Image (spheres, helix red, strand yellow):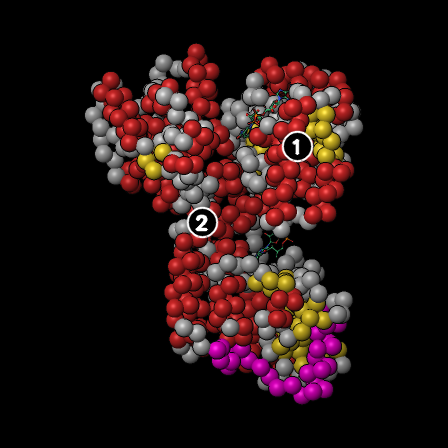
Amino acid sequence: RRGSALCLREFRVSSSIKSSGQVSYELRGDVAVMTVSNAPVNALSLAIRQDLVARIKQFEEDEAAKVAVIVGEGKVFIAGADIREFKRPATEPHLPDVIDGIEACTKPVIAAIHGVALGGGLEVALGCHFRVGVKGAKVGLPEVHLGIIPGAGGTQRLPRLAGYEKALEMIPSGAPIGADAAKAAGILDDVSDEADAVAAGLAFARSVIDNGTPLRRCSELVAPAVDAQVFADAKAAVAKRARGQKSPVVCVEAIEVASQTSFADGMAKEREMFMELKNSAQHRALAHAFFADRALGKLPEIEGIAPRTLKSIGVIGGGTMGAGIATGALMNGLSVTLIERDDEALGRAKATIAKNVGGAVKKGKLSAEQEQRIFDKALSLSTDYASLSEVDLVVEAVFEDIDVKKQVFEKLDAVCKEGAVLATNTSYLDVNAIAAVTKRPQDVIGLHFFSPAHIMKLLEVVVADKTAPDVIATGFQLGKIMRKIAVRAGVCDGFIGNRILATYRAAADAIVVDGSTPFEVDDVMLEFGFPMGPYAVADLAGLDIGWATRKRKAPTRDPRERYFTFADRMCEQGWFGQKTSKGYYVYEDGARKGTPNPAVLDILTEERKEKQINAQNLSKEQILDRYMAAMVNEAAKVVEEGIALRPLDVDMTLIYGYGFPRWRGGPMQYADEIGLEKILSNIKAYAEEDGYFWQPAKLLEELVASGRSFADLNAESGNNSAAKK
Ligand code: CAA
Ligand code: NAI
């Protein structure tokens, strides 16, 4: 198989991270311009920190220089600390000291910001005596997304400069703000009309020299006092949203420290909090997710390959998925031709799209003019496949039935232009079999969207045996246009996500039949950080879907598989979940959050009696261990078979498609944290009860035997800069 994890070494790169970059110093008249150059985002590597110290000293000693301007080379000012260095022990000069040195300068230092000043980048700017931005610049402290807090004075200087409320808005959310908002908040002293940051900085420097503006050090400012209740309220609100992630709450605590102590003590406390989080599993997980996001589309098979033209698409079927896919495409500027079986179905599809688009307008995500354009120009509806003759790509989203899909693809083969990409949104069916009915299997691919398709982020790009590289590239391009997170997957039953889901759901069912309740399982997974437990999700999706699948698969079921009947019995009563107001939970008066359905427990008791199972009471930890072991084991098989190219592809699939908490980094990252040896020994222990279900993945055994981790596999792929050593 292509891309099997066992041959990942093919892609190995031998590069090791060197601390890179430099800060140049140039005298422009009486102004010293210091330019931070460390492509691509001027991260504050060791070399940059060392150079900054040297350049500040040079400026202090340079009698010809009256003012210094710090700018960034390339597209941004400075995007923060070099995250790749976080894995190594911190090396002097530490950033807080570098920034203290800038602030302590006896002559004015100005930060001239273009692009973004993020994290340590904004902290450098806050250490300067003045800040000017060009139009379009953004500033922010996004450290929270990496599971840390600003660690170079951001939590102490920002509230002193912009007030506690602004700091409480910006730091725990991590959201950047634009130049005008930053000026209004007092973070920028000016927004310049100059085209570039150097010109903006020089103009500002001239006014400082001409006016003899006194130095302003953030550390010496006093923010207006606030009631301590403000912090208590902020902490409660942030903790609720964070659902187990620590850094947002610590952000609030660090800002509160600024209100309680001197600047020096506040800095010491900030450092302590920063270091503790920097050494945490949550930071490791979020840094992994940061780099994994950027590695997803970096695939050797499409490197340097241009995608095909992508302006108009066809969507076949306007049901749940088709209408959502059409909505997402239209909202992102593509033209859509939607095909349904008859006018009535077309009318329903149009109504759904109108509702989705209207919702986006209400939320301010789309303008009324864009809405108008969609219905006047961009959307065409038809019952005639011939209307697809000119589209660049088609996504089929008809019923999940292989014969229906084959008929659709035969028709597409007959009507679509040469070079059109033919995609199926199938959840489980064999994309190779679908491709085989066409004369152009190289143009066929799976594009597996998730419901609701205009909202859910994940897109599995399913590569079949004969799919051409530029068709894969086009799948990723469609993902980019539609603002999805595209993950490459291979062909198997359920691809990456649904295949792993089927396994951990089966483990959950076994846990439940063996003695726990569905509500306990849901609670454990909620506590773990999932937004919903698996049984609440089943109620939402509709229990009839799984029932139909089980019936379909019954004839081919392996007799060694433990088969559970409680879900079938529930369906036999007409309990299909939320849509029938009853499933694992009861939904009174159309409520979206249910209360446990006690009758489910009776059904379970009956099943245990029939199967002579002595109910065992698993602890929360035991439930979690089993659930996660099933997930990790199947995920390892998915990587071993090359269905996912790297462990990081699995992690991002579970995060973006299945609610796995990002701050745990996905199942593979979680497994690395727990230790693969422990996971494997758990699996072997469970196998003594059910050897058919709990067959350890070979990859897991191989990694344990060789003392390697999933992170090592990611590193061996050469595409995850965080994992590079
Ligand atoms: N450190 C190291 N590498 C970084 C980086 C950083 N802070 N920020 C970005 N990069 C790398 C990316 O990994 C990527 O590398 P590859 O090309 O090898 O994949 C490259 O720079 C370009 O990044 P993007 O693909 O994200 O480029 P973009 O143009 O879409 O976005 C950006 C640019 C807005 C700056 C975005 O990269 C970003 O948000 N970066 C992170 C900013 C951040 O979190 N800063 C806080 C750092 S922690 C800190 O500063 C702690 C402190 O208080 C001292
Ligand atoms: P659906 O039943 O809501 O919609 C299917 C639509 O296809 C119907 O409107 C039907 O009239 C139309 N249709 C059927 N045959 C057709 C034909 N020959 N030509 C034109 N239109 C035709 O089904 P849903 O849920 O939208 O699923 C569609 C596909 O998406 C399936 O393959 C499913 O497995 C997959 N999928 C579904 C997800 C979900 O959560 N519902 C998630 C991801 C994928």
Q: Which secondary structure, mark 1? A: helix
Residue hosting label 1: 350
Q: Eyeballing the image, is 699 above or below 198? A: above
- Location of residue 255 with respect to 361 vertically, above or below: below
Q: Residue at x 56, y 21 (%)?
A: 400
Q: Residue at x 34, y 38 (%)?
A: 595
Spatial separation of the CA atoms under disc 1 and disc 2: 38 Å
Q: Secondary structure at mark 2?
A: helix
Pointer 2 residue: 663
Is the C-beta of the residue carrying label 2 under 8 Å from the nearest atom of ligand 1? no
Dividing the picture into quarters, in which one does residue 489 lie? top right
For residue 499: magenta?
Answer: no
Whether disc 1's CB lies below 8 Å from ligand 2 is answered no
Seen at 79% across and 28% down, the residue is: 390
Q: Main secondary structure of the magenta part?
A: helix
In the image, residue 283 sits, relative to residue 307, either above or below, namely below
Q: What amino acid is labelled 1 in the image?
A: Lys
Can residue 701 be seen here? The reply is: no
- Give the quarter of the figure containing the N terminus: top right
**Residue 135 on image: x %, y %:** 71, 65
Q: Quadrant of residue 275?
A: bottom left
The magenta segment is: 197-224
